[in-house]
Amino acid sequence: MLQSYRSSARSVLGSLTLIAVVVGGGAAAFAYTAGWFSPHRLTPDRMVDAFAPPTGVALGHRRNHAKGICFTGVFEANGAGSALSRAAVFATGQYPALGRFNLGTADANAADATVRVRGMGLRILTPDGQEWRTAMIDLPFFPVATPQGFYQLLLASASKDPNAMKTFAGAHPEIAAFGAWANSAPWTGSYAEERYNGLNSFIFTDGSGNDKTVRWSLLPAAHPVSVAPAELAKRGPDFLEQEITERVRGGPLRWTMVVTVADAGDPTADPSKAWPEDRHAVEVGTLVVQQIEAERDGPCRDINFDPTVLPTGMRTSDDPFPAARSSAYAKSYDRRTAEAADYPRTATGSKP
Amino acid sequence: MSNNHQRFTPFQRLLHWLMAICILSMLFIGVGMVSTIMPKYLPLVAIHKPLGIAILVLALIRLGVRLRYGAPALPADLPEPMKLAAYLSHYALYALMIGLPLIGWAMLSAAEYPIVLYGGLHLTPILPQSDTLHALLWDAHFYLAFAFFALILMHVAAALFHALVRHDGVFESMAPVPSPRDEVVPAE
């Protein structure tokens, strides 16, 4: 009797141990997947944290390209893009466009003349309910080859170690081209005079199912006029926003969208490497900017210009950046929407 | 809702185990995707959305089947606190199976993200763009997902406790195939 009691107690103990192992193992697998055991995993949280400027994050704002101004207009497709992609946005026609001119800084109050990189976020809608979102910058190539390299660049830039940048440049020699560009490329006095480059490669699929790897750029109709940074500094901290508002009041602004097709062997996975100039390029349409609106009350503020929001006929390539950007942009969006009270609208949403 | 039969109907068991696979995959994909910036982020997100909607549809079917066919009665000798825990945890499981996909759908709507199921197949937004709602729904989606996983672990622990310690037929009532003993010995 005692024997049988003991053996049954032992069997219960064994069963309870088994249950604890199953539950504990499940919990551990979940925690591992969530990255709780991986302090070095490059998570979107760590990436977004690395953007924080010494002055502190601009609450309620984008974590990078924090300063900007909204625009609305249309994308006029000329039909030529249909040879590359079956996306409806390339069929001849006019499609509503929403965008944001912005500065490549995490400081929402940065003086315009102090920020080297300018950008544009753009969203084009088509009647089939699909959309194309892209975020471009005026750099002709990206400063680093990989998202991990970009994270290291952010850490090195923020580091107090005087040798941090030198160490970074040793490990990421591609950064030298950015340094050369930053020192030599002309500054302009207007968002209207910038060329905005998508930099990342994507795959376009045409109506017959043929894939081509492409990059795209917006080329300004306005003629770029070089202005010395010292001269720009005299124009005030927000001269770019004032200038573009004034300029569009005088008439719509245009950019030609050019899609460039990679040749076999071109570096499609590395946006720090520009493709040769002679690559097949197709002018697919014109972006017409018709109206400027302050970000605070404008339609672009609460849009995430996630570059992986693509219509059918376009998809991501072996370029690792769009995934990293999508992940980090979503995190930035989650944080800033949770801080909406820190960046309230003025005209709508709140009664005076 | 209780019934005198010993086991759930084959269709209920099929739904249970199919959804178990879907939901566990879903939760692991969810915590995995929000913790990486690697290229796998995109396929994980692309699976997460349609799988969530599939779980929503399956959960609604399952709720209907449950209301129609009920569930085997719990063993009469099961202590009251355990009975209560069984009832409450099942209400919570149904609420989360239906609620989490809806919250996810609403969260994407409030952010004005397109809700892509596959290719050009989109779901219509169920909320207008709203910062406040997005922040609220994001928190709800995130924390309820962890609560869901914790509840599933408790559910697994309870199922194994019934199977290995109590031997009371509760586990067998939902087992994918009848155990040999189950055929001859009804629960005590």
Image: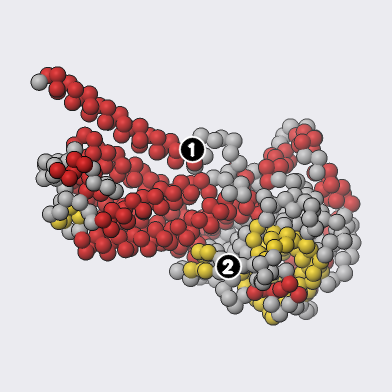
Q: Residue A177: give x, y in percent of width and height.
A: 84, 47
Chain where mark 1 sits: A
Question: In this rendering, is residue A168 above or below A310?
Answer: above
Q: Residue shown at 36%/43% (left/top)?
A: B150
Q: Residue shown at 79%/69% (left/top)?
A: A282
Give the amino acid type for the residue marked by disc 1 in the picture: Tyr
Q: Nearer the viewer, mark 1 or mark 2?
A: 1
Q: Viewer-proximal residue, A138 or B122?
A: B122
The 10 Å Cα crowd at callout 1, few under 14, some 14 to 19, many 20 or more, is some
Q: Viewer-proximal residue, B55 or A344?
A: B55
Looking at the rendered structure, the secondary structure element under dot 2 is: loop
Quarter occupied by the N terminus of chain A: top left
Q: Residue A200: give x, y in percent of width and height.
A: 72, 56
* Outermost residue to the top: A3
Tags 1 and 2 in contact by the CB under 8 Å rule?
no
Colour scheme of the rendered structure: secondary structure
- Taking the image as shown, residue B104 lies to the left or right of residue A297, namely left
Q: Residue A179: give x, y in percent of width and height.
A: 84, 46
Q: Badge 1 is on which residue?
A: A32
Q: Residue shown at 66%/77% (left/top)?
A: A95
Question: In this rendering, is residue A331 above or below B60?
Answer: above
Q: Earlier in the sequence, mark 1 or mark 2?
A: 1
